[in-house]
Amino acid sequence: MKAEDGFTMVELLIVLTVWSVLMACLIPIHHRTFDTIQTKSVLKQLEDDVLLIQQLTMQKHLYHQIMFQPSKNQYILYDTKNKNAVSIRKLPHNWRMEMLTLDATIRFNSRGMITKPGTMRIFSPNHTYKVTFPFGISRLNIEKQ
């Protein structure tokens, strides 16, 4: 009788057990990494959008604004002169925002200063962020709470 090349059942079970343990350790790391990258991306996009509206207001005309819509979990970069949305940004489905002292519509004057400063909160699955739009030319401050 000829011996066949192959793996025994014990060898196969050992390899599958090691593979399962490795996967069980790596999957939670992947989720944390994804959450961290998503958070950085969303907050950076908000900062960039505020800078864009501020720059458009200073360079083109005073009719650019950001409209926050907490009920729809989104904000809109809007050009009221041309009556069109420059961009619509939706927050991830498990995020939400809450307006505290900040109006739902943000406008800048021709010198780049916010017309009505205030604060809002953004809630991610793991953290809460306080977003402050201060007096002056500074765009916004984001603090993890």
Image (cartoon, helix red, strand yellow):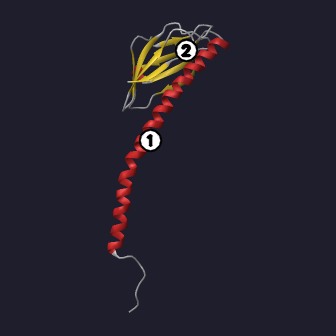
Residue at image coords 36%, 70%: 12
Looking at the image, the residue that sits furthest to the right is 59
Amino acid type at image mark 2:
Ser
According to the picture, the residue beneath numbered tag 2 turns out to be: 138
- Where's the N terminus, which quadrant? bottom left
Residue 120 image position (x, y, % from top left): 42, 17
Q: Nearer the viewer, residue 112 or 79?
A: 112
Label 1 neighbour load within 10 Å: few <14, some 14-19, many 20+: few
Residue 70 image position (x, y, % from top left): 41, 20
Residue at image coords 46%, 18%: 68
Horizontal relation, residue 139 to residue 145: left or right? right
Residue 22 image position (x, y, % from top left): 38, 56
Amino acid type at image mark 1:
Thr
According to the picture, the residue beneath numbered tag 1 turns out to be: 33
- Figure quadrant of residue 8: bottom left
Residue 87, above or below 79: below
Looking at the image, the residue that sits furthest to the bottom is 1
Horizontal relation, residue 63 to residue 5: left or right? right
Q: Earlier in the sequence, mark 1 or mark 2?
A: 1
Q: Nearer the viewer, residue 65 or 113?
A: 113
Residue contact at pointers 1 and 2, CB within 8 angstroms: no
Q: Which mark is residue 67?
A: none
Tag count: 2
- Give the SS element for disc 2: loop
Residue at image coords 45%, 32%: 39
- Where's the C terminus, which quadrant? top left
- Give the SS element for disc 1: helix
Distance Cα–Cα, label 1 vs label 2 = 30 Å
- Figure quadrant of residue 121: top left
Residue 52, above or below 38: above
Horizontal relation, residue 11 to residue 45: left or right? left
Residue 144 image position (x, y, % from top left): 41, 25
